[in-house]
Image (spheres, rainbow, N blue to C red):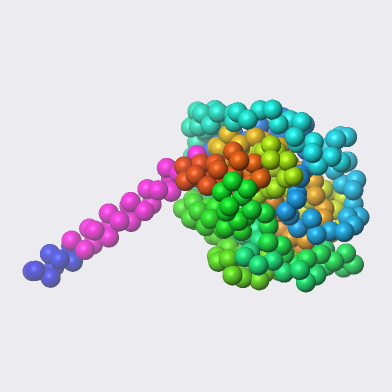
């Protein structure tokens, strides 16, 4: 009898725990409507001041006209373009996103395979690898990334910090998630990160980065996707752009981060070797005091993670 009583208690406990765990799934899926920021963002496309990214390695970038198909941006040449927009330090309110979010039905996601690539690693590796399949352009395997000018936090630390939180959030929403790295002490090139995603049969790759600029006033988030004239992955352009928009817009809605739009980029090794839709999200400028400080704030980070997860949900729905 005693034994039976105990096992009934154990079974009841297990059932309660399962219910609690399952309960999380449905409550978390807030859908953010896709269209909100889309109109503005496609207009004011500003070329990244990609000071830190892989692109900085490139001596000669063959394709300078990439953006022309999608954007009419005449201002794309100037890296400083962003600074003219700068006057607004006010972040558009986070409230906007949450009020409209609740009207949508909760859609159960899951079944999709997501590879998250937290950008960079503790030590860069300047050995070269081809910029794309068959390319004679050689670029550094992986760079060290930028550093928070105010917080002193390294980009590789921020990207993993957010990446791990995003993994947990996505797993909670039913996705299968693979990380290209879970520690700082790795040596995985950008090409190898793309190959990892192929091995995992990923549906999408989300590459997590933060930006740097000469100008400390430059702030805001942007996303990078291949253009339809990319020599390697033109076939992935439209889906990658759709993914980029979904993630960036939901991210900016959730955080209030300034939305600098989706930019075409055909010079990133980690994009050019991809075999599935890919986005690079540049979450903010670590060289800007406001962005840098916000991105180290736990409450703000939770919004960053929710926003990106909402964007991934929006892409798949
Ligand atoms: Zn980066």
4 vs 38, left or right, is: left
Q: Looking at this view, is 218 or 206 the one in front?
A: 218
Q: Looking at this view, is 46 or 110 the one in front?
A: 46
Instruction: Point out the stretch of residues depicted in magenta.
Output: 9-30
Q: Residue furthest left?
A: 1
223 vs 267, left or right, is: left
Quarter of the rendering containing residue 269: bottom right
Please state the total of marks drawn on the protein image.
0
Residue pictured at 12% horizontal, 64% vertical: 5
Q: Looking at this view, is 63 or 197 the one in front?
A: 63
197 vs 10, left or right, is: right
Residue 108 x, y percent position in the rendering = 50, 46
Residue pictured at 30% horizontal, 56% vertical: 17
Residue 61 x, y percent position in the rendering = 88, 55
Residue pictured at 85% horizontal, 66% vertical: 138
Q: Quadrant of the C terminus?
A: top right
Q: Does the magenta stretch include residue 29?
A: yes
Q: Quadrant of the N terminus?
A: bottom left
Residue 34 x, y percent position in the rendering = 63, 35
- The answer, for residue 6, to whether it is visible in the render is yes
Quarter of the rendering containing residue 41: top right
Q: Does the magenta stretch include residue 266?
A: no
């Amino acid at each position: 009898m005693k034994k039976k009583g105990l096992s009934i208690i154990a079974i009841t406990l297990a059932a309660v725990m399962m219910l609690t765990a399952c309960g999380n799934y449905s409550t978390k899926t807030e859908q953010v409507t896709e269209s909100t920021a889309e109109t503005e963002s496609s207009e004011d496309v500003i070329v990244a001041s990609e000071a830190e990214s892989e692109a900085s390695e490139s001596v000669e970038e063959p394709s300078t006209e990439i953006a022309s198909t999608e954007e009419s941006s005449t201002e794309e040449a100037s890296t400083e373009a962003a600074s003219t927009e700068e006057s607004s330090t006010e972040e558009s309110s986070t409230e906007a996103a949450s009020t409209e979010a609740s009207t949508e039905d909760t859609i159960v996601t899951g079944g999709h395979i997501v590879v998250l690539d937290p950008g960079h690693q503790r030590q860069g590796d300047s050995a070269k690898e081809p910029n794309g399949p068959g390319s004679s352009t050689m670029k550094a395997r992986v760079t060290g990334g930028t550093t928070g000018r105010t917080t002193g936090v390294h980009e590789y630390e921020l990207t993993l910090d957010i990446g791990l939180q995003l993994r947990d959030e996505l797993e909670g929403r039913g996705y299968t998630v693979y990380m290209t790295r879970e520690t700082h002490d790795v040596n995985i090139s950008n090409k190898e990160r793309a190959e990892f995603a192929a091995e995992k049969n990923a549906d999408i790759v989300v590459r997590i980065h933060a930006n740097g600029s000469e100008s400390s006033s430059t702030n805001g988030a942007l996303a990078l996707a291949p253009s339809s004239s990319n020599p390697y992955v033109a076939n992935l352009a439209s889906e990658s752009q759709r993914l980029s928009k979904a993630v960036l817009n939901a991210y900016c809605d959730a955080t209030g981060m300034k939305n600098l739009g989706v930019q075409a980029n055909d010079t990133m090794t980690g994009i050019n070797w991809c075999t599935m839709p890919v986005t690079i999200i540049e979450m903010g400028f670590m060289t800007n005091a406001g962005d840098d400080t916000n991105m180290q704030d736990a409450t703000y980070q939770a919004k960053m993670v929710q926003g990106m997860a909402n964007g991934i949900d929006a892409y798949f729905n």
